[in-house]
Image (cartoon, helix red, strand yellow):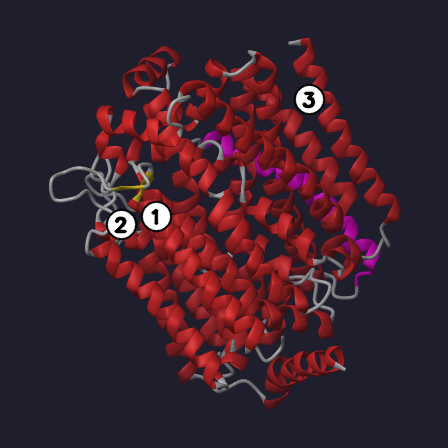
Amino acid sequence: MGLTLLVLGAFGAIIILMAAYGYRISAKTAEDYMLGGRTIGVVVMFFFVLFAISSAWTFYGFPGLLYTQGPGYVMFIWGSVAGFAGLYMFLGPRLWALAKINRFLSPVEVLGERYQSKALRLILSLSILAFIVPYVGIQPLGVGAGFEALTGLPALWGAIYTVVILIVLVLLGGMRIVAWVNIFLGVVYMSALLGSLLWVISVLFPNGGLVEAADIVARTRPELLSDPGPAGTYTPIVLGGTFVVGILAFSWPHVAIGCMTARDKSLFKWFPLLIFVFGGLFFYILPFLWGSLVAPAAMPLGELEQLAAQNGVSLQTEADRVVQTVIKRTLPEWFGVFVLLGVIAAAVSTAAVQLMTSSVIVSRDVIQGLFKPNASDRQITGWARWSVVAIVLLSLIISFFNQGAMALYLTDVSVPGFAQWAPALVGGLLWKRGTKQGAIAGTVAGVVYLVLSLLIVIDGSRPLVIGHPVLPSLMVNTIVYIVVSKLTPRPGEEIEAQFFDEVEAYLKAETTSRGK
Amino acid sequence: MREMIRHRAGRIYLFVLVLSIIGYIVFLAMGGTTAAENGEPILVFGWMTMSLFSGVLFVGFWLVTYIIYFFLFWPYR
């Protein structure tokens, strides 16, 4: 116990020192605090984004769902890889160039100016905040559960520990240090995930490794090795829907804002390479192997059911921590501490970026955009920092009173919510004919439909959900956006010049000047 | 993306990517990741489920097409 607390203390101290260093070297401008001075290169960006999206969910929720429902949920990962790469290939260069030319600090600001609408800016801000804030709170609570399992101390202590690190990191460091710390956190998390996987395989399946594990699962729970899975959940429609939901990852606001921090355009050429090779073909396969093969072979379902009954929790909640349970049973205690560090790293790396994004939106789009247009840099960063504390507290309260299976919260609530700004985003960047009336009507229609579809439950089912919560709401949003845009006057020539012609000329000129 | 639509290589690239997404969804709809007819799960190399194997192929395909287009044809390269 003493050693565990000592290691946790040292880990927290390293992060806080990095944040303090970041504060010392920062330029103390809003651009520096919110977008890292637009100086993030491709390698830092990769760690920044990969570990912004690889939360504690990849350790708990994802393998937990694979353990109970079979491999179908991995379709979300394949879709996400395409979605993240698509963001950087198709939208990223324009978003980056627009923000750089016009000194925009937030993606919502880009759209507010593109559509010339403060109302849209407020609607987008509120809808993004509404769906991102609860997800921030899930991270510390997830760590709390792991903390309790390892140390025996109340989960609340683990959550408080994570929150303190988070607040100090974001308050002091800003976006640049959040990105830099993500390299450190990412290395810790990856080492824990990969190291534990290899070690457990060598201990439990010494004769055949993954083949031996697959043999055991084929004998004991063969339905886990193919779709639709043990409960018949992953029918072809659900598989396709899960895949499409994954593709919508391009609209995650905390990922999209990353495009605006890029140092130069070459990042958009190289970044997808890392996402495909390192993310899709390596990193995300680790939790998949954990949840679909290694954990089921190491921990029979009956044992997990007993454990759930002993702990007074549902099977899915117990399954969410199956990887940690297997590690605790199989590997030395000290390694369990290292794994917990990895989980904390995953949680902090995601929550920090989400917090930064939320605080930028609160400060730049809500407070400055609507109430204090002439605010100074110092005031903007001050509001951003104060909003960090408020957002953390709010998110913890919301998450605490709405605890559920982590994996499904991400895909069933957060992702559909994030997706509601996608039509306005894609249309605003790529479609000259998109209008503010279309963007407002589409976004409001999509969000209202989504909320109603989640709230209206009749006889245990949600009649407004067709396939997946995101599919009908996004379809309504997109159709309304296009139809209303077509029916309203097209944006003025100055908007077309600023948001299309200038951007294209800038991207071309950069290409020419780099080639010379 | 607007720059891609303006030249032939870009249009082919976008078309191929859209086709791969549709193809993958069709593959899923046709039961490509379900068990074999005898009820046995299909395991490539003795441990890769079809969900994993097909996804790796999908990502691999996107990787190859991305390298060809972005390093040889992308107007802003």
Tell me where residue A288 appears, x and y as whole percent: 41, 38
Q: Report if residue A371 is visible in the image.
A: yes
Q: Amino acid at mark 1?
A: Phe
**Vertical relation: A360 (above or below) A348:** below
Q: Are marks 2 and 3 in contact (CB under 8 Å)?
A: no
Pair 2/1: label in front:
1
The residue identified by callout 1 is B53
Tell me where residue A502 appears, x and y as whole percent: 67, 84
A490 vs A193, nearest the viewer: A193
Locate the N terminus of chain A by quadrant: top right
Specify the segment rendered in magenta.
A375-402
Magenta-drawn stretch contains A399:
yes
Q: Residue at x 21, y 47 (%)?
A: A235
Tell me where residue A428 appears, x and y as whole percent: 53, 74
A404 vs A186, nearest the viewer: A186
The residue identified by callout 3 is A8
The residue identified by callout 2 is A238
Query: What residue occupies the far front of the structure in this picture?
Result: A207
Local secondary structure at mark 2: helix
